Image (tube, grey):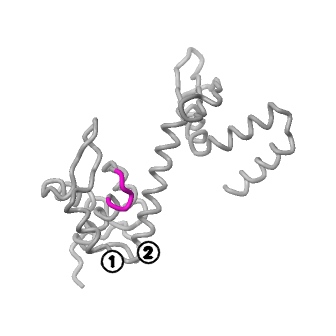
């Protein structure tokens, strides 16, 4: 087989032809059933060693120019599968190695879950005279189940608090609820399980 792409950063078993990269992009957009940003497509493919960054960005631009995928959204950054992309995925996804399909789809689902958590459990960082105030909101749908505010010395620590909160808001909610209700045994179990997951 002749390879026609840059191979820098591609792990063994990754994609080494332009057509495979295009098929993978169609597969991701079709399989998730939701638009993905260009950055999400790049992260799913490049960060997992499946394709070269420059080849993925070139493939996205080429597919948009040819009408295979379309760009939409308020910020014009969301890629959507057209009917052509759906047909390509349906007819050619078996050309991709199953491990590549699985790895890319798991990454895309993980990104979508993270985006949903971040949307539902928002964090506000407000600069103050002696640092920053971080306010975390734990959502219960249309209302806050809980919110709390922390003072931290600088923006770097505020970003760490934000990331750790948005990685697992449900664990933080359960822990705070256990502590304020005096359920120290439950709190200890939550801490023990959180340590095992890291």
Residue name at image x 75 percent, y 35 percent = 177
> Residue 74 or 197: which is nearer the viewer?
74
- Bin the neighbour count of mark 2 within 10 Å (Cα to Cα): few under 14, some 14-19, many 20 and up: few
Q: Is residue 186 left or right of residue 127?
A: right
Give the quarter of the image for residue 29. bottom left
Give the quarter of the image for residue 101. bottom left
The location of residue 56, given as percent across then percent down, is 28, 60
Which label number is shown at residue 176? Answer: none
Give the quarter of the image for residue 132. top right
> Residue 82 or 147: which is nearer the viewer?
82
The location of residue 124, given as percent across then percent down, is 52, 27
Magenta highlight range: 30-34
Which label number is shown at residue 99? Answer: 2
Q: Is residue 98 left or right of residue 165?
A: left
Q: Is residue 174 left or right of residue 125?
A: right
Question: Which of the two discs, 2 and 1, labels the residue nearer the N terminus?
Answer: 1
Residue 129, compared with residue 9, is above or below; it is above
Kind of element beneath mark 1: helix
Quadrant location of the C terminus in the rendered image = bottom right
Q: Is residue 31 magenta?
A: yes
What residue sits right under mark 1 in the picture? 94
Residue name at image x 60 percent, y 28 percent = 144
User: How many numbered circles are shown?
Assistant: 2
């Amino acid at each position: 087989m002749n390879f026609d792409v840059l191979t820098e950063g591609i792990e063994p078993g990754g994609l080494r032809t332009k057509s495979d990269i295009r098929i993978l992009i169609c597969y991701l957009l079709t399989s998730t059933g939701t638009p993905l940003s260009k950055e999400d497509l790049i992260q799913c493919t490049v960060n997992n060693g499946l394709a070269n960054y420059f080849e993925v960005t070139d493939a996205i631009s080429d597919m948009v120019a040819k009408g295979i995928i379309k760009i939409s959204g308020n910020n014009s950054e969301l890629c959507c599968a057209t009917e052509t992309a759906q047909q390509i995925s349906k007819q050619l996804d078996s050309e991709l190695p199953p491990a590549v399909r699985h790895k890319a789809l798991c990454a895309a689902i993980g990104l979508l879950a993270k985006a949903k958590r971040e949307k539902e459990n928002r964090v506000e960082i407000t600069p103050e005279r002696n640092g920053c105030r971080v306010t975390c909101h734990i959502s219960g749908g249309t209302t806050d189940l809980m919110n709390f505010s922390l003072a931290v010395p600088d923006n770097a620590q505020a970003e760490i608090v934000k990331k750790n909160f948005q990685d697992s808001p449900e664990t933080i909610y359960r822990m705070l609820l256990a502590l304020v209700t005096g359920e120290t045994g439950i709190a200890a179990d939550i801490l023990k399980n959180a340590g095992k997951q890291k």
